[in-house]
Amino acid sequence: MPGGGIGSFFVPLIFIFIIMYFVMIRPQKKRQEQQQKLIGNLKTGDRVVTNAGIHGLISNVKETTVLVKVADNVKIEMDKSAITNVLKEA
């Protein structure tokens, strides 16, 4: 019989969705969880890097924003979600 029926169409489609889950969706969820953990652990005195590449020192942590000191007498208030990395102390 040519064609093979409906099952021969859905089985490869299911495998494609399973592969997409492990290649795309699952890693993105892990990154989101790590980012949320990073944002939740921000504290005054942390050296951070923003998604714009700005390096600075957190001088104040508020509910949804942080105050980042980028130079002497220069502080920027930004959303916590803009913080992409906390630098380790040397």
Image (cartoon, rainbow, N blue to C red):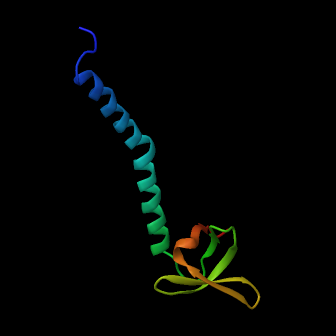
Say left or right for 11 vs 53. Answer: left
Question: Residue furthest toward the front?
Answer: 2
Q: Nearer the viewer, residue 38 or 27?
A: 27
Q: Nearer the viewer, residue 33 or 18?
A: 18
Above or below, 2 relative to 5 = above
Q: Nearer the viewer, residue 8 or 24?
A: 8
Say left or right for 24 vs 70. Answer: left
Residue 67: percent from left, percent from top: 60, 85
Which image quarter: residue 74?
Answer: bottom right
Above or below, 39 relative to 13 = below
Q: Nearer the viewer, residue 29 or 85?
A: 29
Question: Residue furthest toward the top?
Answer: 1
Q: Quadrant of the C terminus?
A: bottom right
Q: Quadrant of the N terminus?
A: top left
Residue 86: percent from left, percent from top: 59, 69
- Seen at 45% across and 45% down, the residue is 24
- Seen at 37% across and 33% down, the residue is 16
- Seen at 23% across and 24% down, the residue is 6
Residue 87: percent from left, percent from top: 63, 68
Instruction: Count how many numbered circles sit on residues in the image.
Output: 0
Residue 40: percent from left, percent from top: 45, 74
Which image quarter: residue 77?
Answer: bottom right
Question: Residue furthest toward the bottom?
Answer: 73
Say left or right for 69 vs 29. Answer: right
Above or below, 54 relative to 73 = above
